[in-house]
Amino acid sequence: MEYPQNQKEAAKFAAGAVERMAELGITANPQNFTVWYAYLSGFDTSFGRHIDSMLAKKEPFDDTQCADLYAAVLRLSLGDKEGTREAAIDAVGGDLEKAIAATTEILKQTGSETERYGETLEGVDGALQSAGTAEQMQSVVANLVEQTRLMVEQNRNANESLQKSNNEIAELKIRMADIRSEALTDPLTGLANRRAFSEELADGMSAATEQKAPLCLLMLDIDHFKAFNDTYGHQLGDEVIRLVAGCMSAKTKDGDTAARYGGEEFSVILPEASLQDAEAVAEQIRVTVAGQKIVRKASRQTLGSVTLSIGVAQLRAEDSDEDLIARADAALYAAKHAGRNCVQSENDLAEDADARNVA
């Protein structure tokens, strides 16, 4: 994370962060320090307003809330600084290249030693034939034994080095996969993030066009979420977002992509799904979410339930990704206007337009 302040300003914000944590009874660990340094330095205006609201309402900064605030700082930081993530990928890629080069060098060296040992064996044949005495023959055999011992030792060392290199390569591959997974995952929900959504939609549209297969897109929004947040606080709001994400994951299958599109808005990419199939999936998600009860953990107070409005659109041959998203969004807003807690498809929009024209 980078900040524009000079050394004097940074020292002021650092001291202020420690003081503020002490006032609020917050554990002074590195994660919490990062949150309060970011807040005091004006790292992000929306993040600052969020904490201002919590302070005004005297909401407690418990472990869960502090963890969520730290996750928010990371999301904002990573969202603005893709180069940091790319640098990490480049670094792992460089280490991987070095490990592969080391393995190649070990194999090359082992091949040279094997070739040299073969030449030794060929020389032994001639030396044995020319040996005139037992002492000379014994010397030739002793040399062969020593060369064989060296070869065995070199092979053992080479095998150990190869195993070490292979372990390093395997570890680097895991690190690379972790970095990519982090880059494409929303930390609050575990769903695909906006970047992953864009990549999956582009790939899915390309495959659908090539295979002449259907593809549908759902756009989902939590009804009256701002009012819920204002009434019950952001911590419970985050729990609602996680609940919706869990319902989406439960009602989608392998090959589908459920994503957090932004804030309280979500999306689902449904490859090989007709519009009717997509509407059925949307309805399953809507019903599942509406059936969940929101409970405040501390008091076990039941706060009712939340609902979703969902828009559905199907890919057309001439569509860009913006076209498909726009139609799904239009259907989502139609669901809002129809009273919320319902599913509307692009066909419903067309039917409404026809009805208005007839009237």
Image (cartoon, rainbow, N blue to C red):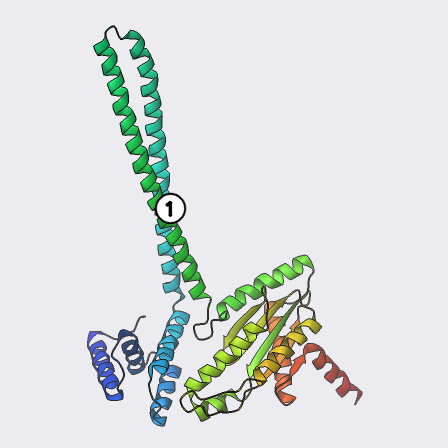
**Residue appearing at x 26%, y 80% in the figure:** 27
Name the residue located 36 percent from the left edge and 51 percent from the top edge.
94
Is residue 51 in view from this perspective? yes
The residue positioned 59% from the left and 77% from the top of the image is 219
SS for dot 1: helix
Amino acid beneath label 1: Asn
Whether residue 231 sits left or right of residue 64 in the image: it is right
Tag 1: Cα neighbours inside 10 Å, few (<14), some, or many (≥20)? some
How far from the left and from the top, in percent, is residue 210? 66, 57
Q: Is residue 263 visible?
A: no
Most extreme residue toward the right is: 358
Give coordinates of residue 190: x percent, y percent: 47, 71
The one nearer the camera, 315 or 104, is 104
Q: Is the residue 226 above or below the residue 118 in the image?
A: below
In the rendered image, the quadrant that contains the N terminus is bottom left
Q: Name the residue under label 1.
A: 166
Query: Which residue sits at x=30%, y=11%?
Result: 128
Q: Where is residue 248 in the image (x, y as percent from the top left)?
A: 56, 75
- In this rendering, the answer to whether 234 lies above or below 166 is below
Image height of 207 relative to 8, above or below: above
